[in-house]
């Protein structure tokens, strides 16, 4: 069964509306809601005074209408009483400013007051609803780290020191890892170490890097503490939390390891011509977090959002296409934010499954149609997406890559990921997104965009993949530093030098807006001076120096890109490499813009064809979706 529904916030509505909601949900095919995400102040109106009566009624009402509940732990937005009584439960920004309550997600992960109050609430929720027949899963917090990824307060300073002592052992280890011989930054006692608060100039990059990982871990510790409580009360109930698209704020692989099911929220800009590529990438990232296990789309907008500045509506058919694209790429659950559009508050202009006009509205009718269609696709659930190509993404690299004081400040992880992902998407090749240390042996082609920070283990993994016959593409500014952000000595990219068969003599990045001529056409962003050491130049810069190289290594081949070709040239190049590697489109022969993904189960293949163009193609109408089920 495919689960279908949305965030349900009954606390915003009088009881009479709840009854209508439950009836409408049943009629729309809704079988799951995420409940109570921002209900803390309503169930605990004053410290330690709980009012669960109304919430019991909602749980029972939903159960009576066959709607299951992904129950939120309600801890994402503490009530004003907590911040008022305990200012140290509020987060502090890098400039020392404490953020006030009045919005949401105002929490310091190291605050004992926040921990105590949040776990008190979760304990009561778990005791009260752990055995409720409507309970389907736990939704821990909400989009951790999305609004406030890091807190710089004194409590976090102390927690950061403990984290550092676990990581580096003693002060000597820390001083060594952070290269504190530079600029007289040597620490002589733990008390001197602070979060990387606003300072005079360029901060110590290793300090900032460790703080990014600490901050993800600090939030993860809160998530884990809540998880332990609900697991104790209801060990069989799966636990998840909704990832906020794909951001550097939290280390998603580390988080996914503590989730029973990965789930995420995706909000492509309906006005953007390539919003569907952005979504496809997020879906592939989430699927990769648990080795291809089906995941849940916990939030998307039925139509417009309210937070993009200008918020275009989704055109007819777009909501269905977005939803089926998620299913194609491995989702077993399709949910929205939110069930009923709010009457007041900051999100009143965010679309809902039931709009302000009520259910007799084209948007709600399309919600019902989607409910019917998903019910018919029930046996897609549990099947796995087929992919023979992988793209590598690593969070510690992401944090390090985007530090200040690099050869170019134009190299951003998401943009670079898209520079590699989009051509593969256009070629119809389905990609998994994996870590640099994942076993790559099942892939025909592995693409590594800008893996600036690389561990020795990851470098060995890439080499052994190629050695045993794999095809690898590595792009510039990869293999430069180790996990401490210290240069791998011996000529860039030292740990990949043998594998790539070259060394980079000097980086020569291009100014914003500038381009350089290559045999592949104009290229932007980056160039460099390469000395070949076994690799062959396949494409060159205008001065004849190598721009794209190929090195036969063991039974496979390692390609290297020393610049950023224009999108079409990049698609052509990736197509050439993919053909050599034997990586194939999911469905060959489709025109660009018709996305095909295959989900495979025991004796069944579900072929999803999603047409993002205005031209009909064979069995797929313009802007339409066709799902073909094949039983060999
Ligand atoms: C999400 C958030 C929801 C809602 C939604 C609006 O990031 O989890 O609570 O605010 O955005 O698009």
Image (cartoon, rainbow, N blue to C red):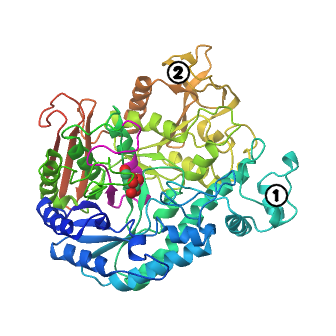
Of labels 1 and 2, the one closer to you? 1
Q: Is residue 453 left or right of residue 103?
A: right
Dividing the picture into quadrants, the one containing residue 176 is bottom right
Q: Is residue 112 above or below residue 279?
A: below
Q: Which numbered disc flags the more N-terminal residue, 1 or 2?
A: 1
- Give percent across and percent down for residue 90: 59, 64
- Give percent across and percent down for residue 35: 32, 68
Q: Residue at x 50, y 60 (%)?
A: 105
Dividing the picture into quadrants, the one containing residue 475 is top right
- Given residues 613 and 477, the one toward you in this image is 613
- Given residues 229 and 109, the one toward you in this image is 109
Q: Residue at x 84, y 62 (%)?
A: 172
Which region is colored magenta? 282-310
**Is residue 42 within the magenta segment?**
no
Q: Is residue 541 left or right of residue 372?
A: right
Q: Which mark is residue 175?
A: 1
Q: Residue at x 69, y 64 (%)?
A: 160
Q: Which mark is residue 523?
A: 2
Q: Is residue 11 above or below residue 416?
A: below
Position of the N terminus by quadrant: bottom left
- Given residues 33 and 281, the one toward you in this image is 33
Q: Is residue 498 left or right of residue 144?
A: right
Helix, strand or loop under label 2: strand
């Amino acid at each position: 069964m495919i689960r279908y529904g949305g965030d349900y916030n009954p606390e915003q509505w009088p009881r009479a509306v709840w009854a209508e909601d439950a009836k409408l949900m049943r009629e729309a095919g809704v079988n799951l809601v995420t409940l109570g995400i921002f209900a803390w102040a309503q169930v605990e109106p004053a410290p330690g005074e709980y009012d669960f009566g109304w919430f019991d009624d909602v749980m029972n009402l939903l159960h009576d209408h066959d709607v299951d509940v992904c129950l939120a732990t309600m801890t994402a937005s503490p009530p004003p009483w907590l911040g008022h009584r305990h200012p140290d439960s509020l987060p502090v920004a890098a400039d020392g400013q404490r953020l006030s309550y009045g919005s949401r997600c105002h929490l310091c992960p190291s605050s004992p007051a926040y921990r105590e109050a949040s776990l008190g609430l979760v304990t009561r929720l778990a005791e009260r609803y752990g055995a409720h027949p409507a309970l389907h899963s736990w939704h821990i917090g909400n989009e951790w780290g999305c609004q406030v990824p890091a807190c710089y307060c004194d409590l976090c300073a102390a927690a950061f020191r403990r984290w550092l002592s676990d990581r580096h052992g003693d002060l000597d280890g820390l001083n060594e890892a952070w290269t504190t011989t530079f600029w007289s930054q040597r620490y002589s006692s733990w008390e001197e170490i602070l979060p990387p608060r606003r300072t005079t100039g360029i901060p110590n990059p290793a300090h900032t890097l460790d703080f990014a990982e600490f901050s993800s871990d600090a939030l993860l510790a809160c998530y884990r503490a809540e998880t332990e409580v609900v697991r104790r009360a209801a060990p069989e109930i799966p636990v998840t939390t909704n990832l906020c698209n794909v951001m550097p704020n939290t280390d998603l692989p580390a988080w996914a390891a503590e989730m029973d099911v990965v789930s995420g929220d995706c909000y492509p800009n309906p006005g953007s011509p390539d919003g569907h590529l952005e979504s496809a990438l997020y879906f592939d990232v989430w699927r990769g977090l648990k080795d291809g296990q089906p995941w849940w789309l916990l939030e998307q907008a039925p139509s417009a959002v309210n937070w993009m500045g200008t918020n275009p509506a989704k055109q007819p058919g777009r909501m269905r296409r977005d939803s089926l694209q998620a299913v194609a790429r491995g989702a077993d659950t399709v949910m929205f934010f939110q069930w009923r559009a709010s009457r007041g508050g900051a999100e009143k202009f965010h679309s809902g499954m039931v709009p302000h006009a009520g259910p007799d509205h084209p948007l709600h009718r399309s919600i019902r149609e989607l409910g019917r269609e998903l019910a018919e696709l029930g046996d897609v659930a549990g099947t796995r997406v087929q992919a023979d190509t992988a793209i590598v993404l690593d969070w510690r690299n992401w944090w390090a890559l985007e530090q200040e004081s690099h050869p170019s400040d134009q190299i951003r992880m998401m943009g670079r990921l898209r520079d590699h992902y989009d051509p593969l998407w256009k070629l119809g090749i389905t990609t998994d997104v994996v870590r640099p240390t994942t076993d790559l042996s099942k892939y025909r082609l592995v693409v590594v965009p800008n893996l600036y920070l690389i561990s020795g283990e990851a470098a060995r993994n890439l080499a052994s993949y190629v050695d045993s016959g794999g095809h690898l593409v590595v792009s510039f500014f990869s293999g430069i530093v180790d996990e401490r952000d210290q240069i791998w000595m011996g000529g860039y990219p030292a740990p990949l030098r043998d594998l790539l068969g070259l060394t980079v003599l000097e980086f020569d990045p291009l100014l914003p807006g500038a381009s350089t001529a290559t045999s592949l056409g104009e290229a932007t962003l980056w160039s460099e001076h390469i000395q070949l050491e076994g690799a062959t130049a396949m494409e060159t810069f205008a001065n004849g120096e190598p721009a794209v190289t190929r090195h036969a290594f063991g039974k496979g081949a390692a390609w290297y890109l020393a610049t950023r070709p224009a999108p079409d040239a990049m698609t052509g190049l990736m197509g050439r490499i993919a053909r050599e590697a034997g990586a194939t489109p999911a469905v060959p022969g489709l025109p660009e813009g018709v996305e095909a993904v295959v989900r495979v189960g025991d004796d069944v293949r579900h072929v999803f064809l999603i047409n993002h163009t205005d031209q009909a193609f064979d069995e797929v109408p313009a802007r339409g979706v066709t799902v073909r089920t094949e039983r060999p």
